[in-house]
Amino acid sequence: MSQISTLEIISGSLFTGLLVAHILLRTYYSRDRGLRLPPGPRPLPFIGNIHQFSTEYQEETLLQWGLKHGPLIYARFFGTPVLVINSLTIAHDLLEKRSARFSDRPRFVILNESMGWRAIFTWKKPDGVFRRHRRWLSDTFQKSVVKDYQSLQLRELHILLSGLIAKPEQYSSHFKRFIGAILMQIAYGHVVTSDNDKYITVADETLLKIVRFGSPGTTMADFWPACKCIHPSKSDINTEFISVAYLPAWVPGAGFKRHVTEVRTLVRKMIDRPYEMVHEALASGTALPSFTASLIKRLSNKGSLTTEDANDIKEVAAIVYGAGTDTTNAILASFLLAMVMYPEVLKKARYEIDSCIGQDRLPGFGDRGSLPYLECVLLELYRWRPALPLAIPHMTSSSEVYSGYDIQAETLIIPNAWAMSRDPKLFPDPEAFYPERFEGVDPNDLGERDSRKFAFGFGRRVCPGRDLADGTIWLTMANMMVTLDITRIIDAAGEEVVPSGARTSGFVEHPVEFSCSIKPRSTKALKLISQMETGLNEHN
């Protein structure tokens, strides 16, 4: 028999004691007693509904709950009260109209406290620091400023189109480099000149490992009682990590433990190294304009840059890059998949572009208002494959009553964007990619059918970079359509191979890798792509 250390015995006993105490207290002082709660699946004693909550494709599980219990669902995961919202109307009523009480964030045990994304803006509670960070991001991504990034977007678009022609099978890598280069320059003034850029490589590896753990706030450790009852202080960031480390291996979803330390190291590299690069460039007078450089200068002018200021800048700059890369990459991959699976959409959109602007130039930002069908394609893309199927959970800061139901303070709110996108009353045949469902309706008058309302988050938590992301995706779609022939591959029997349309499970949804044919549409298209580079060089 293997020996067991004294530390393991003490830790195991402590863990068991805390768990039992937590369960007894939660059971004895039940917060649900006497409340009018929304319908939901029947819970078991102690564990609640956690046994019914899948570790993969959670959005589909919650969609099925909604089909049985209605669009507003109550559940309990161990001691955590949970409200699932499967309706855009209800999401608007609670997360938009009552945002003051529905904009808090739960504790993200894995992401914040175990992996080290502790003070990142996206996860922060709406306090003074949150408002400071959001003001910085709003200044960077307001519509008037986003226009200043157009030459950068066009430069990287040229590289993207050239890459898709040269190595079409590597479309995912091209998309990743494309959006990564745009955001890396905005965040840090760093010009990406290689597919193996050291900063992008570290950031992508970090984000890839993080999103595999599932949606933030809905992992097993976020609900496991012993992880919830030890609340780390600001001075001891490892307390929660220790409690997670002793999560029993038999608990579903506990396999993350062996990866946490590795990810913590990567997170620090992703946050610290680009900031250090900008700081050194400022000292040598070689720094290019960027979000990070601007803030360092601004805060340094008020006196010496404090450690707190430096950490704030690091964290928000990392979100500028991290929040946009994987999601935009996923949306562009879904666009490519849709064009392969639904060639009639590509044909119709291309005809509109050719009819509007001809074939002697490429579409630009100024053409957007003249291409209504392409706008429908974009709306359908957001609906068909929402990049964040479960958005990012909110939490109530106080008790509330809605439609006769009691909603407790500190209730975890899960906005199920996937279910909203699959509402057959709003979107008949929801699994089909059908842009025509939006035709003939002003994009500003779509109401509940506006897929942008669940594509970029809700209320005070809406993505501050949505205008940049939306414009980048639109421009990329338009230019890929008019310069590339995107078709299905032909197998050995001479038959077209239609992709399955399968998708990955996790925080960010991606299409499962698929094969397709990408070729230049014509020699004229090749010439137009080449002329993009000439025009950019003249502009610079």
Image (spheres, rainbow, N blue to C red):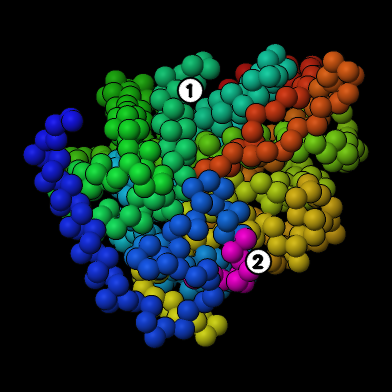
Q: Which mark is residue 495?
A: none
- 200 relative position to 431: left or right: left
**Which element is circle 2 on?**
helix
Which quadrant is home to the C terminus?
Answer: top right
Rounded to the nearest angstrom, the CA distance separating label 2 from label 1 is 49 Å
Question: Residue at position x 27%, y 53% from top?
Answer: 227
- 280 relative position to 99: left or right: left
The image quadrant that residue 156 belongs to is top right
Coordinates of residue 48 in the picture (x, y in percent): 41, 65
**Which element is circle 1 on?**
loop
Which callout, 2 or 1, points at the residue further toward the start of the chain? Answer: 2
Q: Which mark is residue 67?
A: 2
Range covered by the magenta-colored residues: 64-74
Question: Residue at position x 84%, y 20% from top?
Answer: 490
Q: Is residue 134 magenta?
A: no
Judging depth in this view, the residue of 446 and 220 nearest the camera is 220
Question: Residue at position x 63%, y 45% from top?
Answer: 470
Q: Is residue 68 magenta?
A: yes
